[in-house]
Amino acid sequence: MKKIHIKKPDIKGAFHKLKNLKTEDVKAAWKAGRERRARIIEERRNSAFARKMKPVYAFMNRFSLVFHALLACIINFAIEAISRHSVFEAWDYMTGTPMVFLYNAFMIFITFSIVYLFKRRVFVRIIISVLWMVLGVANGYMLMKRVTPFNAQDLKVAKDGLTLINNYFNGFELTVLIIGIVSVIIWVISMWKRGGQYEGKIRRVWALVGIVVCFVAYGFASDLAVEKRVVSTYFGNIAFAYEDYGLPYCFMASLFNTGITEPNDYSKETIAKISNNGEITKNETGRTEEELPNIIFVQLESYFDVDEAEFFTTSQDACPNLHEMYKNYSSGYFKVPSVGAGTANTEFEVLTGMNLRYFGPGEYPYKTVLKDQTSESAATALAALGYGTHALHNNGGNFYSRARVFNNIGFDSFTSKEFMNILQTTENGWAKDDILVQHVMDSMNTTDGKDFVFAVSVQGHGDYPEEKVLENPAIQVEGIQDEATKNKWEYYVNQVYEMDQFAGNLVKAVEDRGEPSVIVFYGDHLPTMGLKAEDLKGRYLYNTNYVIWDNIGLPKEDRNVPSYQIMADVFDRLDIHSGTGFNYHQERRKTKNYLADLELLQYDILYGKQYVYDGKLPITEGHMVMGIKDVSLKNVVPHLDGGYSLYGENFTKSSKVYVNGEKQKSSFLNNTRIDLSETELINGDVIVVSQVGSSNTIFRSSDEYIYQDGQLICQEGTATDKTKSWVEQTDGDE
């Protein structure tokens, strides 16, 4: 075998040449480089591929505008076919609404105008085309996994989504995805060399003028399209909007149309009139302190009463506990702002009393305005009446930026999965909900008074497997012929059954406490099952179900409630009048201009000058701590073969050990023991155990412990300060 000889670099010689470098040498090198590049270009021009493609490129350049228009139509049709999972549906969309189709094609067309700034026009066309096709493929795949289409706000939760990649991609799909991405990248790179160059003179000034004209023309076209109702600036239903108005327009609308646009009649005087000169900011109740109940809201992931489905039956009642509650307590349909996804938006409406219809399409306030800005909520409204306020979620604390948002809307504590010892998970990896029962109890035990607990479950989360993963399901599904569809529904129904068991267990645990309490159960949205309105008894995709359980004798009053009104409705039943938004709903729900004035009020609170508060803001900074139990260390035991065992309390799988500020390789064994396999401790080392979320976010840390002669010396008072916000004590990075 021939040996490979690697020549040693002549560093000394290189420095010598650099030292003696002359101007003439630089000019000669520059000239040689130009000649070499010219030679390479000439070789490419004369290659077999270039000669073959030369007439094609010439045609494309001579009739570039016509070519761009044709290409834009082809791309538009392709991404709609991918999004709709059907060439025939794309054809119906194109022929049924030709003006919408042409408007979207025009949007794609103007993006091709930038090619005139470059010599490598073929390559730039390819880049633009690939970007549009990637958008179509992403939307098509998202719609396979959920009902809500791909929008710009999904890009803001992309980092969160990466942590759940195994929940949405199986091994085969992930392999295909990686191969596809790599293949496209290789092809695009190859076209940089093979795509040829424009041989004429580039007139960049005229090109820029042409680009400006194109975009101005698009602006006029957009105004005309809205005026003639070809498209709309309001998406009451983002999924239906994508079907009606096309992917390009809807995606761009979700990218640029965010938040709430300032209403025309916004002013201090208008807000004063709406708020009755600030009267709706009051915090009061007609109940005595002893009469005020604990208030628990439980948001059930992807839950709805499966008896509402008309195309299948179940072997037994999937929701016996909740059905019993429906019979005896106030219940009804629960109108939510999304289908198949968008948990955080239902959550936002419930907690703030704000209606998402006034926000930009596809907006997630949790990822935008509330991530860095404080706002009043149910937590601040009840805290003003002396309630302890706690949030719970058996998923990651960083998902949807909840750890930051809950801090900014006034919660006292947030217990995420990083503070839970989750032992039971579903077949596709989500934590089961029953673990929330104990954590609800633990949260209520932290205060002597009344508590508001807001719990978000995760067990019912998709994706639902098409193969049979439940060997002996408690409930069988009948009436569905397609095996894959049947398996998905059978899996889902059994998750609903276990969620119902959790609801029953929570009610029993609260009853056993013997304290006056109210529990509200509701579903955040329908599951990602491709449901249609005609599949449901209620004939509406934006309805789930709710029930208000209590042990204080509230009268049964069944009615349908939208998610942004539910908190105000419960408060009203309890004679609680606290929180600006909730007071507004209670006083104005059945009055003239209710919704128009609500938009003004929401704008004032989140984006305006906050006239309603008259300088008396209900919350200026958060104070929330992560978790409610301290992690502590008791002792350290060395292993005979090296390493140590740390013994203590309240460890979880998210407990990470730091020695002198450096994270150690560790193994979680149980809530009292963590093993360090590669660590060598010496006297004076500082040991800290932290609860760590995604992106290495440290949510909470124990006291520091000094290692000394095999013992741990606690430095009391060095742990995360429970009197301050966790964000204030960390960088809060996600």
Image (spheres, rainbow, N blue to C red):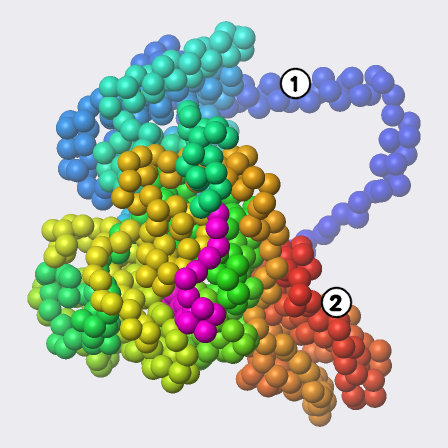
Taking the magenta stretch, the answer to whether it contains residue 297 is yes
Snapshot quadrant of residue 20: top right
Is the residue marked by circle 1 packed among few (<14), some (14-19), or many (20+) residues within 10 Å? few
For the residues bearing labels 2 and 1, Cβ distance under 8 angstroms: no
Residue 117 spot, x, y in % from top left: 51, 16
- Label 1: element kind: helix
Residue at 48%, 61% in the rendered image = 382
Q: Is residue 145 above or below residue 155?
A: below
- Residue 661 badge: 2
Q: Is residue 583 above or below residue 676?
A: above
Q: Which residue is mark 1?
A: 35
Residue at 23%, 34% in the rendered image = 244
Of circles 2 and 1, the one toward us is: 2
Q: Residue furthest bottom?
A: 640
Q: Amino acid at mark 2?
A: Gly
Residue at 49%, 75% in the rendered image = 444
Mark 2 or 1, nearer chain start: 1
The quarter of the image holding the C terminus is bottom right
Taking the magenta stretch, the answer to whether it contains residue 225 is no
**367 or 696: which is nearer to us?**
367
Residue 596 spot, x, y in % from top left: 34, 34
325 vs 214, left or right, is: left
Snapshot quadrant of residue 721: bottom right
**592 or 54: which is nearer to us?**
592
**322 or 339: which is nearer to us?**
322
Q: Amino acid at mark 1?
A: Glu
Question: Does residue 633 appear in the picture of this structure?
Answer: yes
Is the residue marked by circle 2 packed among few (<14), some (14-19), or many (20+) residues within 10 Å? few
19 vs 311, left or right, is: right
Instruction: Tell me the magenta residue range.
Output: 281-303
